[in-house]
Amino acid sequence: MPIYEYYCASCKREFEVLRPASQSQDSAPCKTCGEPAKRQLSTFSFKSNTFTAPKLKPATKPMRSYDLDSPANPAAETLAEPAAKPASEP
């Protein structure tokens, strides 16, 4: 069974759920608040004892669409509209 990643907009938490592929499109209840959470797009991974994987750079957390709304995110500032410049006095 695959592991799916979910994001709860109510409490702003990410969590994983192990569930059958037949339930992949269903929302999952948040483990913290119980609200329905939206499934996130995640990277594929596998483990094998017979295959030697190539040396890859360490995985980084993917940027999510809700990350763009965060004021602490520098990418949010660059994508947002520039602030109006104050008028200079004569």
Image (cartoon, helix red, strand yellow):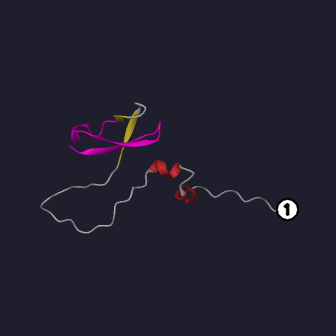
Say which of 64 and 17 sits in front.
17
- What percent of the width, then of the height, locates residue 3? 27, 45
Image x and y of residue 43, in percent? 31, 54
Q: Quadrant of the N terminus?
A: top left
The amino acid marked with disc number 1 is: Glu
Q: Tell me if residue 71 is in the magenta stretch.
A: no
Residue drawn at point x = 22 percent, y = 55 percent: 46
The magenta stretch is 1-27
In the shown orientation, is residue 68 left or right of residue 89?
left
Q: On the rendered image, what quadrant is the C terminus found in?
A: bottom right
Element type at mark 1: loop
Q: Which residue is situated farthest in the front direction here?
A: 49
Residue at the top extreme, as displayed: 34
Q: In the shown orientation, is residue 4 left or right of residue 60?
A: left
The residue nearer to you, when weighing 36 against 46, is 46
Measuring from the top left, give residue 41's x and y in whole percent: 34, 49
- The local crowd at label 1, few if under 14, some if 14 to 19, many if 20 or more residues have their Cα within 10 Å, is few
Farthest right residue? 90
Asked whether residue 4 is drawn in magenta, I would say yes
Residue that appears at 45% across and 50% down: 65
Quick check: 85 above or below 2?
A: below
Q: Which residue is mark 1?
A: 89
